[in-house]
C-alpha cells in the first residue's frame, strides 16, 4: 500500500478495526446462546482471553511472518503518518483473532482452557499468517505464478478463504481431535439433543456479527480513496440471500435463521468488490443452503459434534466464497472481471490444505503432549464450574 497522505485514512481503518473488534462480542454471544447453561461463562471468557493471546502472538510473530513488519523501534518512528501502520496492524489483528474465535464455537463444552490458549498462540502466530502472507502480501511467489499462468491472482478481498475457510477447517480438525461431547451420540448411533440455552443470546450474537461485518468487508479497502458502495450493497444482498435460504431450508428453525445471514456474509467476503448485487444474492442464497444441509449432515449423519457448525458455516461457505468470486466476478455474469476461476480454485484449495495440515500439527501435538479435553467429571459439571469455579447464575443446579 502507498503511504497515506492524511489522518483520514488512519481514522478510517481505526473505525474498521473497532467495528471488527465488536464482532468478537458477537462470537461470544453466539456461542453463549448455543451451548448449554453450564458452559456459558466459559464461552464468554474464551473469546476475550483468546483475543488477548492472539494480540501477543500476532504482534511478536504473526504480523512479521505475513508482512515482514515489526514494531521494535522508537515511538517517534511508530507515530509517523499519524500512526497509520499501527492502526493497520490493529485492523488486521482483528481478522487474525477471528480464527480462534471461530474454532471456539466448534470445540465448545469439552475443551481444556490452557491448551486451547496454547493452540491460539500457535495458530495466530504461525499457521494463519503463513497463508495470509501468500494471499495478501505476495509471499513465496504464489500469486505471481497464478497471474503468469492463469492471467489473474487469487482474489480474496475481505477473507472468505484467508479468514473464514482457514478458521473453519482448523475448527474441523480440532473437533475431530477432541471427539464428541459425552452423551451426544449413543452406542447405537442415536443422536441426543443438546438444545441451545438461549435463543435471544444466540440472536444477539448474530446481530452483532451482522452489523460489524460491514466494517469487516467495506473497510477492507483500508484507505478512503478505495472505498466503494458496491461492497456494502453486495454484503447486504448476500446477507439477505443467506437468511431467506436458511429460513426456507431450515423450516423456520431460529438457529438456522440466525446463522443464515452469517453464511451469506462469509461467502461474499472474497468477491464483494467484484460481483453484481444479483450475483451476491445468489452467492448468499447458495451459502445458506450449504450451511443448513451440511450442518445437518455433520451433526446427524456423520456424527461430528461441531457445536456451532463452524465447519459448514466458515469452512464450507468460506471455500464457496473463494470459488464463487471466480464465477460471479466474471464480466459474463455482470462482475467487474479481472479474476480467474482456476486461480480462485487453487488459492482456495491451498488455504484449506494449510489449515488442515497446520491445525493437525497444533491440535494433535497438544493432544499428545498435554491433553486437550476435560475429563468425564469436569465435562459433566460443565466448563463454568470446572474451569472458572462459578456458574452463569446463582442457581445451584447447572446440569442441564
Image (cartoon, helix red, strand yellow):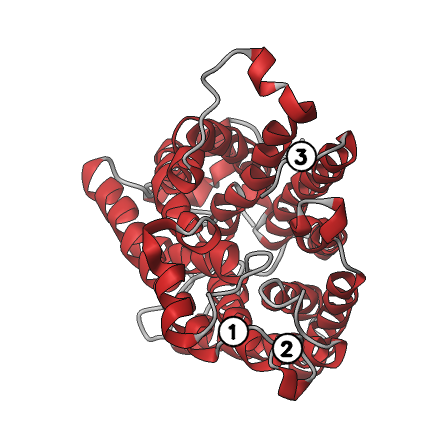
Which residue carries the number 1 mark?
Answer: 320
Q: Residues within 10 Å of mark 2 (few under 14, many from 20)?
A: many
Q: Is residue 63 left or right of residue 246?
A: left
Count numbered badges in the picture: 3
Which residue carries the number 3 mark?
Answer: 393
Q: Quadrant of residue 183?
A: bottom left
Which residue carries the number 2 mark?
Answer: 283
**Nearer to the camera, 240 or 199:** 240
**Nearer to the camera, 253 or 346:** 346
Q: Earlier in the sequence, mark 3 or mark 1?
A: 1
**Furthest-left residue in view?**
368
Which image quadrant: the N terminus? top right
Q: Are marks 1 and 2 in contact (CB under 8 Å)?
A: yes
Where residue 275 appears, x then y in whole percent? 67, 74
Q: Is residue 225 left or right of residue 36?
A: right
Q: Earlier in the sequence, mark 3 or mark 2?
A: 2
Tell me if residue 398 can be seen.
Answer: no
Label 3 SS: loop
228, above or below 297, in the image: above
137, above or below 68, in the image: below
Where residue 373 appears, x then y in whole percent? 33, 43
Label 1 SS: helix
Distance from the alpha carbon under mark 1 to that under mark 2 = 8 Å
279, above or below 185, in the image: below
Residue occupying image coordinates x 54% and y 34%: 51
* Of the two numbered discs 3 and 2 in the rendering, the one whose residue sits closer to the viewer: 2
Amino acid at each position: 500500500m502507498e503511504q497515506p497522505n492524511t489522518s483520514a485514512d488512519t481514522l478510517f481503518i481505526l473505525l474498521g478495526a473497532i467495528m471488527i473488534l465488536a464482532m468478537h462480542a458477537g462470537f461470544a454471544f453466539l456461542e453463549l446462546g448455543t451451548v448449554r447453561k453450564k458452559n456459558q461463562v466459559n464461552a464468554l471468557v474464551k473469546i476475550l482471553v483468546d483475543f488477548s493471546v492472539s494480540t501477543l502472538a500476532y504482534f511478536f510473530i504473526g504480523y512479521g511472518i505475513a508482512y515482514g513488519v515489526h514494531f521494535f523501534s522508537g515511538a517517534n518512528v511508530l507515530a509517523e503518518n499519524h500512526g497509520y501502520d499501527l492502526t493497520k496492524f490493529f485492523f488486521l489483528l482483528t481478522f487474525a483473532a477471528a480464527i480462534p474465535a471461530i474454532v471456539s464455537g466448534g470445540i465448545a463444552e469439552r475443551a481444556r482452557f490452557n491448551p486451547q490458549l496454547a493452540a491460539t498462540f500457535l495458530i495466530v502466530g504461525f499457521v494463519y499468517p503463513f497463508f495470509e502472507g501468500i494471499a495478501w502480501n505476495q509471499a513465496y511467489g504464489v500469486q505471481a505464478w497464478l497471474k503468469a499462468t492463469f492471467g489473474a491472482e487469487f482474489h480474496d478481498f475481505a477473507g472468505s478463504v484467508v479468514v473464514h475457510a482457514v478458521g473453519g477447517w482448523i475448527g474441523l480438525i480440532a473437533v475431530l481431535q477432541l471427539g464428541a461431547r459425552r452423551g451426544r451420540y449413543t452406542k447405537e448411533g442415536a443422536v441426543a439433543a443438546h438444545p441451545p440455552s438461549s435463543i435471544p443470546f444466540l440472536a444477539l450474537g448474530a446481530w452483532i456479527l451482522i452489523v460489524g461485518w460491514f466494517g469487516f468487508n467495506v473497510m477492507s479497502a483500508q484507505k478512503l480513496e478505495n472505498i466503494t458502495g458496491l461492497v456494502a450493497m453486495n454484503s447486504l444482498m448476500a446477507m439477505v440471500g443467506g437468511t431467506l435460504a436458511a429460513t426456507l431450508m431450515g423450516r423456520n428453525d431460529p438457529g438456522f435463521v440466525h446463522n443464515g445471514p452469517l453464511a451469506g456474509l462469509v461467502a461474499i467476503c472474497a468477491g464483494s468488490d467484484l460481483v453484481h448485487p444479483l450475483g451476491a444474492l445468489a452467492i448468499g442464497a447458495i451459502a445458506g443452503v450449504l450451511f443448513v444441509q451440511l450442518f445437518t449432515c455433520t451433526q446427524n449423519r456423520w456424527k461430528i459434534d461441531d457445536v456451532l457448525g463452524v465447519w459448514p458455516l466458515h469452512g464450507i461457505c468460506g471455500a464457496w466464497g473463494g470459488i464463487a468470486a471466480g464465477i460471479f466476478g466474471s464480466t459474463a455474469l455482470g462482475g467487474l472481471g479481472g479474476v480467474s476461476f482456476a486461480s480462485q480454485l487453487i488459492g482456495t484449495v491451498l488455504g484449506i490444505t494449510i489449515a488442515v495440515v497446520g491445525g493437525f500439527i497444533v491440535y494433535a501435538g497438544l493432544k499428545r503432549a498435554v491433553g486437550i479435553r476435560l475429563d468425564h467429571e469436569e465435562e459433566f459439571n460443565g466448563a463454568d464450574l470446572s474451569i472458572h469455579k462459578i456458574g452463569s447464575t446463582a442457581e445451584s443446579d447447572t446440569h442441564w
